Each structure stands twice: as C-alpha cells, then as structure tokens.
Image (spheres, rainbow, N blue to C red):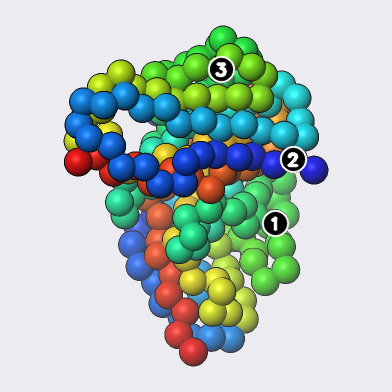
Amino acid sequence: AQTVTQSQPEMSVQEAETVTLSCTYDTSESDYYLFWYKQPPSRQMILVIRQEAYKQQNATENRFSVNFQKAAKSFSLKISDSQLGDAAMYFCAYRTYNTDKLIFGTGTRLQVFP
Amino acid sequence: SQTIHQWPATLVQPVGSPLSLECTVEGTSNPNLYWYRQAAGRGLQLLFYSVGIGQISSEVPQNLSASRPQDRQFILSSKKLLLSDSGFYLCAWSGRGGAVPQHFGDGTRLSIL
C-alpha cells in the first residue's frame, strides 16, 4: 500500500525568506501524481501545486515550487518570499495513475513571522 | 465555473442521534465525489468515494454511510452517532483521469456530546 510521510510536524519562517517542506512517499508504481494542498485556519483545502511523475521538470506556481526526486521518492515544497498569508497546514498527497483516490500525509504546520 | 457546497458548517449532536451532512456540486457533470474526515491535528482520512449515482465505495469500516441519490449530490449519514465520530468532515469532487486535483468544500465541524 502507498504511504505518504511528512516528517516535519511544524516549521517556521520569517517573512520574505524561503522555506522547504519535506514529503516522502512509498510506492511500487511508476506512474502517479503528487500534490501539495494548503489548509489555512479557515480549514478550506486549497490546491497549491501538482506534479506528474512522468515529468522530469519540477512544477512551479509563482512563489511555490517543488523538488521532485523520483528515485528517492521525495517531493518537497519550496516557498519563496514567504508571506504572512502562507501560514497554514500543508499536506502532501499522492494519487495512483489508475485511481482517483488521494492518500494524504499528516501535514506540516507552517508559521510565518514578521 | 464549478463550485462545491457543503452544509452545515458546524453541528453539535448528542450521542446516539442521527446525522445527515450534504454536499452538492455545481458546474460539472458526472464528478467523482469524496467524503473525508480530519481528526484534530491529523491528516485527511478518506471515508467514502463515488464514481456515479448509487455507486459508493467505503474505505474504512465505521459507523457512517454515504449515498449519492443524484449525480451531483453526496450525503454522509449515521443512524446513531458515537463520541468517536467527532471531527471535521470534508466533501470533495474531482474530474476523471490525469493530474486532476480534488476540490474541497468548506467542511463541517461535528461535535458529539
């Protein structure tokens, strides 16, 4: 069975600085998708970024980028120029190629200090 | 554009009472639908998912059930709530195939007394 591990329960960063959140996963599949979701205090889950495993190029969305290391089964999220509004829980999620079910990690709480 | 509505936002129920949480999606047809539960400080646990009307898959044995009476309506129910059913419940929808993401509702905070 596939599993997703986020080893950092909490992280903090100063405004305008860069922070990296870690995520590793375990799978025997070669085709799959990876996602990062953000859950602010309002509790709504918001998609941050997605990555197809067959793509070697790392996904980027404005200040958010990923470091996808397929061989190492690692999918870290880098937030550049951190803003106060980035404070939230961040969840890494995995989806196999042939199903639509997401497997979530336990999350990393990110605090942003002014 | 597609939207997802989930209600109520907050619910306080006594142990042993029934439950009905509703989720509807607008602006799309034949979506996949999902119910998740999030315990305090934890990740999301998939409870049920549905690929069509009347088609429900249960991921974990529990005191809850789900139904999909219409294409864009997904209902989470219980006949008798337990204390352990407390939590934050999220409904989500997605398209099919590819790197389609799941889109989440605003959630329901359920407290059992």
Q: Are marks 2 and 1 on the same chain?
A: no
Q: Callout 2, which amino acid? A: Gln
Q: Which mark is residue A59?
A: 1
Quarter of the figure with the N terminus of chain B: top right
Q: CA distance from mark 2 to mark 1?
A: 24 Å
Residue name at image x 45 percent, y 63 percent: A41
Q: Are marks 2 and 3 on the same chain?
A: yes
Q: Callout 1, which amino acid? A: Ala
Upstream in sequence: badge 2 or badge 3 = 2
Q: Judge by depth and name the residue closer to the eye, A80 or A68.
A: A80
Q: Nearer the viewer, mark 2 or mark 1?
A: 2
Q: Which mark is residue B68?
A: 3
Q: Are there few (<14), some (14-19), or many (20+) residues within 10 Å of tag 2?
A: few
Above or below B2: residue B51: above
Chain designation of label 1: A
Residue name at image x 44 percent, y 70 percent: A110
Could you tell me which secondary element the residue under label 3 belongs to?
strand
Above or below A105: residue A80: below
Above or below A31: residue A45: below
Residue name at image x 44 percent, y 36 percent: B36
Q: Which residue is mark 2?
A: B2
Q: Callout 3, which amino acid? A: Arg
